[in-house]
Amino acid sequence: MSGELSDEQLRSIFTEDVRPYVESQRLLATGGRSWPPVLVYTGGQPGAGKSRANERVSQLRPSLVPVVGDDLRRFHPDYARLMREDPLGMPAATAQASGQWIGMAAEYLREQRADVLIEATLRSPAAMASTIAAFREAGYVVELRAVAVPGEVSRLSTVERYTGQVAASGAGRWTPAASHDEAFEQAPRTVEELVAAGAVDRFVVEDRAGAILTDMSFFGFRDDVLRGVAREAAEAFDQARGVDKMSTAQAREWLDLAQMQVGRLAALRVRDADLLHTIERVATVDAAAVAGTAFPGDADRRRAVTEKLTDAAARVVRAPRQIERRRASDSAYGGSAPSTGPFMGPQSAGWGGPGLS
């Protein structure tokens, strides 16, 4: 089974599998319900660290019942096959079902008057606004907690998550680069629109480590005032995501991690175009930006570090592209291309030595 599920299939799987899972999560919640009940959104682009943010807010409010789309993908009837045969395509193949089940789970928990935690990428204010409206009508207070992380950091984290899952289980979940970038670009606008519409009672910005950078309350604010504070909220969030907000130590750790991930992709012999494009961007554009923070005032060190990363990534990316060109050439001349298997690229060599910093 593949492709989008019918309404009947979605509802049937929710009733038989997803709802019992959500109910088990509700029974695990402790501390008693809030009054009035609370809906908390944790938001940020893929790789921003929302899972850790979920853990932190759940410690503050043990009564929260989490609704996380990635946790629901496994209920898709094609999930196991996708993870075996096409793990890079799994997120897109299960996106429709996961999104529908998030909405159904939220509705079920709202009917139970439970405190609810929903994870979001902040890509679409319209989708969030409709859910929030239903909770507000039911008497809920709404809190939005955004994780402020530079795009360079979260982009590398999506690579790290993929290679780590492959190492642990043989298959990894990949976030398409376009999905990451769209979420990063749209997040401030989503924050501004939700606050301006009066959909959020409290807005919190925290960094990846959990430090609170902004904490704004909008109880009792009218429309004209909300429009002004909405711009302030979006700007505070966006400014907190700059590479210049990284410490020197954090920037150097990022460069070491980038080196490690290039090496891991070399060992995996990845040939997925999107993944290769992402690591190429990490090792060039992103590395140049981060190196400025890692080695301020030391142009020679910045150049040496970025050139080393760029050269390493080029070796990882070059071989699969050469193979594809040969395949195209063979096909054009009626020849048969060699079998390459699911992964192809240079063998890992020389990695695992001293870090870049």
Image: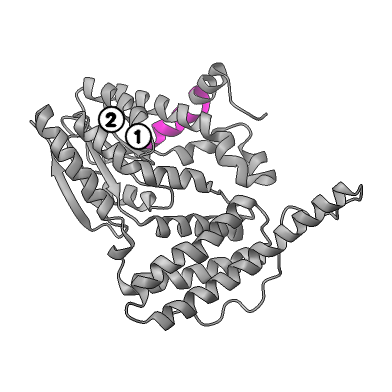
Residue type indicated by callout 2? Ala
Q: Residue at x 52, y 75 (%)?
A: 307
Characterize the magenta stretch by its predominant secondary structure.
helix
Image location (x, y in percent) of residue 319: 71, 63
| Residue identifier under label 1 | 26
In the picture, the quarter occupied by the C terminus is bottom left
Question: In front here: 132 or 270?
Answer: 270
- As displayed, is residue 47 above or below residue 216? below
How packed mark 2 is, by other alpha carbons closer than 10 Å (few <14, some 14-19, many 20 or more), is many
Q: In the image, which residues are magenta?
A: 15-27
| 55 vs 307: above or below | above
How packed mark 1 is, by other alpha carbons closer than 10 Å (few <14, some 14-19, many 20 or more), is some
The quarter of the picture where residue 32 lies is top left
Residue found 28% across the figure and 63% down from its top? 245
User: Residue 26 magenta-drawn?
Assistant: yes
Instruction: Specify whether residue 86 is in view.
Output: yes
Q: Quadrant of the N terminus?
A: top right
Give SS at disc 1.
helix
Question: Magenta span has 240?
Answer: no
Residue 162, percent across and down?
55, 55
Residue 279 at x, y percent in the picture:
55, 60
Query: Against 125, is 297 above or below?
Result: below
Tell me which amino acid carries mark 1.
Arg
Q: Earlier in the sequence, mark 1 or mark 2?
A: 1
| Mark pair 1, 2: CA separation | 8 Å
Q: Secondary structure at mark 2?
A: loop
**Foreground residue, 339 or 16?**
339
Query: Image point 14% across, 40% down: which residue?
Result: 229
Query: Residue beneath label 2, please?
Result: 114
